[in-house]
Amino acid sequence: MNVHTLVDEMFFDHQRALLHFEFDKALKLLEMYQATLVRHMQDEELILLPIYADRAQQSGAGAPKLFFDDHEKMSSFVKLFLERIVEIKDQPDIDKAVLQILDREAFYLRLCSHHDKREADFLYPILEEILTDAEKRDIMSHIDLSPEAASIQIRNADDQC
């Protein structure tokens, strides 16, 4: 399982808990999602994107700045969701509050989908093309999060929820 699939599943689990009014569980799952997402974005921003920016010379839809901008937007959305879920129990109309969060999350998921497509169309295939096998091995040795490590996080959280 790749990291993108994993974070998608983590977010879905968060939404399922939110939908069932399990707010503490939804919050915990979203916090885990945020931690996993941030680690993945850091890998891209600190390791992959500098190489891509230096050697790929992409512009337009593949411009490195767009990846950084997407990451900033995604982080802001997740922080907003965390704040809203913390406040949700104090809302006079919890049904309405849940629907508003889910609506914003739907917009966020479209942003994520667009970002993932940009990575699949530009970042990853171009890096695959321009990096030597030795460089790929070196990069992989510095990547902070494997899907297996994140899967362990999820199993541990399920035990706690």
Image: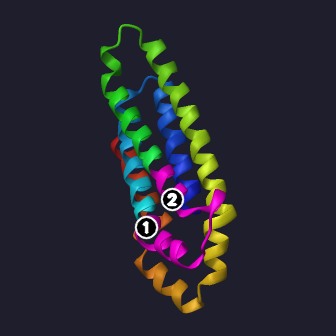
Location of mark 2 (residue): 65
Q: Residue drawn 44% across and 38% down? A: 77
Whole-percent x, y for residue 42 in the image: 40, 63
The answer to whether residue 107 is above or below residue 66 is above
Q: Main secondary structure of the magenta part?
A: helix
Residue 7 lies in the magenta-colored region: no
Location of mark 1 (residue): 43
For residue 36, say whether it is visible: yes
Whole-percent x, y for residue 23 in the image: 38, 27
Q: Camera-side residue: 101 or 51?
A: 51
Farthest bottom residue in view: 134
Farthest top residue in view: 92
Q: Disc 1 to disc 2, how far (Cα)?
A: 16 Å
Quadrant of the snapshot with the C terminus: top left
Quadrant of the snapshot with the N terminus: bottom right
Label count reads 2
Image-based side of 5 in relation to 158, left or right: right
Crowding near pointer 1: few (<14 within 10 Å), some, many (20+)?
some
For label 1, the SS is helix
For label 2, the SS is helix
Question: What is the span of residues highlighted in magenta in the rendered image?
Answer: 43-71
The answer to whether residue 9 is above or below residue 49 is above
Whole-percent x, y for residue 59 in the image: 62, 63
Residue 67 lies in the magenta-colored region: yes
Q: Camera-side residue: 30 or 49?
A: 49
Q: Residue drawn 42% across and 59% down? A: 152
Looking at the rendered structure, the kind of residue marked 1 is Asp
For residue 145, say whether it is visible: no
Looking at the rendered structure, the kind of residue marked 2 is Lys
Whole-percent x, y for residue 73 in the image: 46, 44
Image-based side of 124 in relation to 37, left or right: right
